[in-house]
Image (cartoon, grey):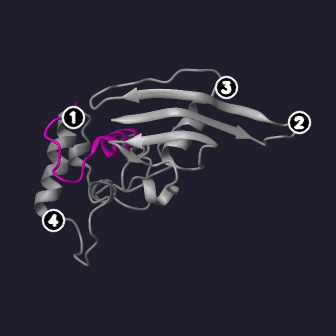
């Protein structure tokens, strides 16, 4: 469950350029909830996501994930608990790496690092099966580099998979 409790963020406080981007924002998202945030330019959509991910700390309020207070954690510390999908699918992926390598990075997020090289056969098969469920033909292009024109369409899919991926244990449905 993700909760924002009375979160406020003010840019350039006390100046003529002061902008209240979030004003006492509160909401709760339960496991399995699907939410679309809609608003005009400057409405606070990106600011809200940046607050959740820790790009900056809120001026007031709390951000909790499964009861863990993330409010004072830096962006890299929060990365242990959550992923991020950017508007530009090339942001947040390693364009010079293969699709399967990007998936492996996401799947191993938050796990203890080892010196084990490469991607195991079982991991590759898991990625292939999950991608096959999407019906986009990506399951046959795991070795394509994300940044190549032939694979660029897969980036949106990859970021969506990354967001939904839970490292331990792997989920059995895409919900």
Verify CB contact (< 8 Å) between mark 1 and mark 3.
Answer: no
Pointer 2 or 1: first along the chain: 2
* Image x and y of residue 46, in percent: 58, 36
In magenta, the rendered stretch is 156-175
Q: Quadrant of the N terminus?
A: top left
Q: Position of residue 125 (x, y in %)?
A: 13, 53
Sooner in the amino-acid sequence: mark 4 or mark 2:
2
Distance (Cα) linking label 1 and label 4: 22 Å
* Residue name at image x 21 percent, y 65 percent: 119
- In magenta segment, residue 158: yes
**Magenta residue check for 125:** no
* SS at mark 4 in the image: loop
Q: Comparing marks 2 and 3, which lies closer to the viewer? A: 2
On screen, 88 above or below 81?
A: above
Residue wearing tag 3: 41
Circles 1, 4 touching at the beta carbon (< 8 Å): no
| Circle 1 crowding by C-alpha within 10 Å: few under 14, some 14–19, many from 20 | few
Callout 1: SS: loop
What is the CA distance from the residue labelled 2 to the residue labelled 3? 20 Å
Location of mark 2 (residue): 16
Instruction: Pick whichever of labels 2 and 3 is earlier in the sequence.
Output: 2
For label 4, the residue is 120
Tell me: residue 95, above or below residue 3: below
């Amino acid at each position: 469950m993700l909760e924002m409790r009375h979160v406020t963020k003010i840019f350039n406080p006390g100046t003529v350029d002061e902008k209240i981007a979030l004003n006492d924002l509160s909401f709760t998202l339960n496991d399995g909830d699907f939410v679309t945030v809609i608003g005009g330019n400057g409405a606070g959509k990106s600011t809200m996501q940046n607050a959740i991910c820790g790009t900056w700390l809120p001026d007031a309020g709390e951000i909790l994930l499964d009861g863990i207070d993330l409010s004072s954690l830096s962006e890299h510390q929060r990365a242990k608990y959550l992923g991020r999908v950017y508007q530009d699918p090339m942001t947040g992926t390693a364009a010079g790496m293969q699709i399967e390598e990007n998936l492996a990075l996401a799947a191993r997020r938050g796990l203890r690092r080892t010196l084990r090289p490469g991607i195991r056969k079982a991991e590759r098969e898991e990625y292939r099966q999950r991608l096959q469920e999407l019906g986009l033909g990506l399951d046959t292009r795991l070795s394509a580099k994300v940044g190549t024109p032939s694979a660029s369409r897969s980036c949106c899919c990859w970021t969506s998979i990354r967001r939904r991926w839970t490292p331990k244990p792997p989920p059995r449905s895409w919900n």
